[in-house]
Amino acid sequence: MIEIIRPLTQLVNLQSPLSLNDYISEGGYQGASKALHDYSPKQVLDLVGDSGLKGRGGAGFPTGMKWSCVPMFEADDDNAPAFKYLVANADEMEPGTFKDRYLLEGAPHQLVEAMIIAAYTIAANRGYIFLRGEYHLAGKRLQQAINEAYQQNWLGKNIQGTNFSFDLYVHTSAGRYICGEETALINALEGRRANPRAKPPFPQISGLFGQPTVVNNVETLCNLPHIVKQGADWFKALSPNSDSGTKIYAACGRVKSPGLWELPMGTTIREILYQHAGGMAGGFKLRGLLPGGASTDFLLPEHLDTPMDFDSIAKVGSRLGTGGLIVLDDKNCPVAMVLNLMRFFAQESCGFCTPCRDGTPWAVEVLTRIEQGTGRKEDLDTLYNLCDFMWLGKTHCALAPGAVEPLKSALRYFSDEFEQHIDNGCCSYQQDNIVNKSLTLQSSQGGAVHG
Amino acid sequence: MDDKNISAAQKVTVYIDNIAYQVSKENNLLAGVLSQKLNLPYFCWHPSMGSVGACRQCAVTQYQDENDTRGRLVMACMTSVSDGMRISLQDKDSAKFREQVIGAMMTNHPHDCPVCAEGGECHLQDMTVMTGHSVRDYQGTKRTFNNQYLGELVGHEMNRCITCYRCTRFYNDYAGGKDFGVYGSKNQVYFGRQKDGTLASEFSGNLVEVCPTGVFTNKVFSAHYTRKWDLQSAPSVCAHCSVGCNTSIGERYGSVRRVMNRYNYDLNGYFLCDRGRYGIGFVNSAQRIKKAQGINQTSPEKLTRLDVSRALAHFRDKRFIGIGSARASLEANFYLKQIVGEDNFSAGYNRQQMAVAKEYQQLLSDNFIDDKMLSLREIEQCDFILLVGEDLTKTSPRIALALRQACRNSGIEKAASMGVASWQDSAVRTISGKRNSPFFAMQPMATKLDELTEQCLLLAPDDIEQVMLALTTVLCLTDNEKSNYFHQEEWQAFTFEQQSFINKVISALATAKKPLIVTGDSLLSAKILLATNKLMACLKNQATPSKVNLVVLPSASNSIGLLSLIDEKSISSEQVLAKVSTKTVAGLICLEQELTVYTNEQLTLLREHAEVIIVLDHSESRVSQLADIVLPAAAISEGNGHFVNYQGRIQRFSQVHAAALPILDSWKWLSYIEKALDFSISNQATLQRKKAKPKENLAELHDYFSENFTLWPTLKDEQLEQKFVARMTKRASGRTSQSANFSVHEAKVVEDKDQHYRFSMEGNKPNAVKNMPFTWAPGWNSNQSINHHQVEIQGQLSHYSDDVYVSFNFTRESDKNVAVNDDTLAAVITDLTAKKTLTYFPQGCLFQGEWQSALTAEFQLLAHSLEKNPTLYLSTEFVESQGWEPGQWLNVSADNKSCFAQLKCNNELPQYLVYGNINDFVDHKSGLSIKLTEVSEADVIQYQKNRQTHYQHLKVIQQNTLKQLKISDQHIPIRFVAGGLDDA
């Protein structure tokens, strides 16, 4: 088997991340230097476009296309806005997802370098790293990296003798899942309620404080130094698949060795689960899995050979999402798992639009009764109705449709479980093994478990 | 959507359920659907506040073309109208979704309609019925909240909230409020204040109408409650400032219950200020005059016309001075002037005020002979504002709100350049960022609008005049001349801030498309008005790219009506005193005039010398207490007449209910007086010895005037030939049994001799006339039913007809204007520029700024609220020079009055300028000279105790007033014929 190239994680050191000088001596900042000195912003944009890099936050939107919407101005253009912003979305709160934390804690300079390149491309003069509040260590390390970068003129005025100036700040979030939505993030950054904004206008045109703004996921950004350094073709060749590059995949739940691994885009679920996570833990059988965090549809063991890329996962009815697998085994109750997820989404609804605000708690109410054994036959209709009620196109943002995905797929794949709960008036798993259930609840809450 | 009539060109064809409709492209699809009078439920959208897409209630299915059978769900409020678009309201998908939305809202909405004040006019009820949701699927418990005390005006019941965000969008985004917000998240979103306390916005009452359900309720109305359908309503005009907002007053059992906004395309639109909404309380106050005083009645039961004639017979043929008033109707003032003659007519203004009136008239005749002053809606479209010498948030709050909207135009323009329509509220606000249209202001006190200004100068009136003059000078100069002028001493005398203010105004003016200058008379400075006139003259000659608009705002509801009656012969309050003292006249007729211009000494003098003082008023004042004869006049809700607003627009207020006799319209009393005194006025040939028949209704009065006076505007009752319109709703219950505790016989319907509204539920629908008594449409019981009565959403009412305006041609044959004594101007100036003494300017108080509304029990409480200490702002420089500390208490004395106030510093203030909110200086005179002395801590404690006692006293008055109202509900003090004294 050929050796896997792991550009994103090769310089990660969780114990003590590389200092600026060490990072440079390992080949760091070469991408930024090349971009600043050898390329025009347009050339970088084309390069990123050619590389086929897609957003790693979950939606998979081509990064080059996102950037190309940012209005560019000549230096003497009176209409040029005073500020353009670049924001790194480091508010990693998707249950079952902890990849950005790994990059932030292990290689902060990689993100700083990436943001210099991105800012240069869109001519942003101010950047923010919107960091999940609980990521204290990442915050400390990022700040240290930024300080070092300022000292050596990788940030600030006229970076490395060029005309390009860029200031970078770390902003720690006050903590809402919805801040992962880019316009809600912008509102939070402005000091407003973290409600998603109406689109259009898209942030690229009118974002933070009304100015052109690009928001990118941490993992997406971290690809940039390598793309600039090694070229678009190299990046495409990293993956045997139509989606370019590598992806950090993770697995949690009842697997032998939960963790995360940088693998070529399009690695199959089976390979991730059995080769890297070591297969199911002793005594547990695979029942199903969420392929990319909590807001994706369940997949079944029959889907194990699906490549984990955007299109292939979509074809089998789910979403690649963040690439963090959450594994459901045969000893834990699927209804309880869906209930737990729904509680999370109900809790994290921003309260703006009706389907999400009042629909998710309603689903929680129904699921709770079913799980407790006091459900009725009509409750399943209510759940189907609610799935319909909160589906895409009916809500203000993607939170509620995301919440619907595990519920809807569970209703399809595990309908017998729901019916048994109602018919028997109890949850059979709860009687079997109370300890296991609480463990599952914990592990499916993501951030708490990591590799 | 801003033009009166949307031309056919802007309309496109939209197929709604396969029927073609012509829909305006200027607004969103929801507005387009509602404009066709189709029913589509909505919550978060508001015609004035635009769309945000929060409630998802207005979902419809949109189809690509006629072959598309699936379609896709879109939110109508977030969708633009395009030619040939096909949508469906009746398809299963969207109908089911709309029902689900209501179902979801109902998971937390309590089933308390029977005890909810909103019940019967609840938008949520209407929309629920509209979607067909009738069975509750949700099995869980409901969320509960604690409610807050939000002051005396607005009630709070958060459990009813359906989280549509309208309240915060109005209070914070639209009206600029700071003390209200959104807290929490998920289905626990809380709308309220950080802690209990009175809402600080001047527009808090609009929450009641903006809220689609019963979260925010009219607290005063709830305290003496009746269902909407049991109210008797009539179209009225706000009596509490010069804007002339249209209102609908509701009454039951003889007492006024509430004021609601009455949509007016040109003026108030959908919103009123709190003074307009709650100031009506004076009608129910304990100070109302309900009986005639000083007249011997032959029957103790009732006052007859004969009694009045007898009482006045003694003064037959004697001469009287008539003092009119800016709060009395145009008819009453006009009539009074005709009765007493023009050289015995006074507006109740002193010399200073007469000087202001003269300049005011000059300003109006110089600028508004051909043009009309901008309406409130037009003000909202301006993109440059220079505000001179007014705190509009306290004098004309609704205009302040309009200026706030005008400031957004720069952002709206930017959004438009990006293809985002103005109704996309959140998108426009995102794009606007911190952008504001240029706004400059000068006044002596800090105001709530200052935050919107590019620059704001705090200046004494004379300095404002100087800056205005310099601005005029610089505007007229060429570039070369400018650089010369900038070196001259005259220019150097200005501070750097003032210089840059002038320069910034000029450069912003040069690029403005619809610039606006706003000023008024609240500082009583004739010089500012004169300077404004000079500036306007200069701007007219300038080749400015756009015409500069001017808006001048007087203080009272009929100030302009009164101003139109003031001429060169009108006398000042000083001259009144002189005439009475020299016994040139027998006495005075005070028409709704409390004579605040007189000091107590002057008033005593007046009393001593006047043979007789006749007062016509609705509430007791210090003048009515001195009077020989007091005649109870109708308050706004009890009478008919016209007010002239700041633009000169003549607007009708109609009788809501017939008050118990002998309360009559002032002009009706004047017709009795005219008859009884048999005035003969030598210089009014037309009236000479004309045995005038008392006028029983407005039409008779108008005929009488139009026969005699060519100046009288033609005020024909609208569509008199029309059928009668009911003042009550079709569902009004209990009219026939309301007196059943006395007699089971059905009472006769009160006849209205004045107009075509009926005191019953019989008659045409409310929308049959332009001035709708109330608004209702099938399926729409809330005020939002107004949608059904507009040509287009936010457009003109279906029965629109042009208003009549008074002429501003004040040029007269003799001296062309009010004769002002030579030294009047000079006297005014020296008064205000006594720079070595501290000069105090009140910040103004919404609840005390107008005499009538200040009598409202709730306003008394709010004005003397213990939540805030009286505060005095001084320049930091001055405070330091005295060795005082911010926060310390001082004794403030002026005009024989003194009170305590807490000291605060303001860096922007010139040294001798002081402003504050000392409500004890009730007359709120501008430019008072004050003295400050330090006080001991013990005195302050005593002072605070006194305040508390006084507050408790006011609280008792409020409760007693309410108790009295509830008692009189049992007696129903109404009469059955709304004519004159002997009709009943």
Image (tube, rainbow, N blue to C red):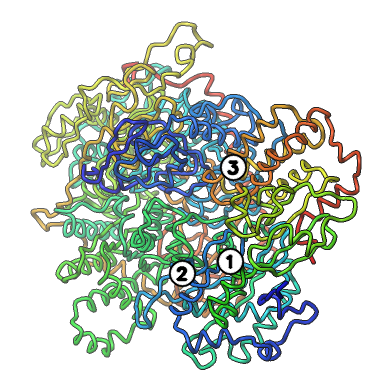
Q: Position of residue B182 (x, y in %)?
A: 60, 52
> Does residue B100 appear left or right of residue B819 in this picture?
right
Q: What is the secondary structure assignment of the residue under circle 3? A: loop
Q: Position of residue A54 (x, y in %)?
A: 56, 65
The answer for which chain carries disc 2 is A
- Cα distance between the residues tagged 1 and 2: 14 Å
Residue with the mark numbered 3: A390
Is the C terminus of chain A in the top left, top right, bottom left or bottom right quadrant?
bottom right
- Same-chain check, marks 1 and 2: yes
Amino acid type of disc 2? Pro
Mark 3 surroundings within 10 Å by alpha-carbon count, few (fewer than 14), some (14 through 19), many (20 or more)? many
> Does residue A276 appear left or right of residue B94 in this picture?
right
Q: Residue at x 11, y 53 (%)?
A: B812
Residue with the mark numbered 1: A189
The answer for which chain carries disc 3 is A
Residue with the mark numbered 2: A212
Sequence-wise, the earlier of marks 1 and 2 is 1
- Cα distance between the residues tagged 3 and 2: 31 Å
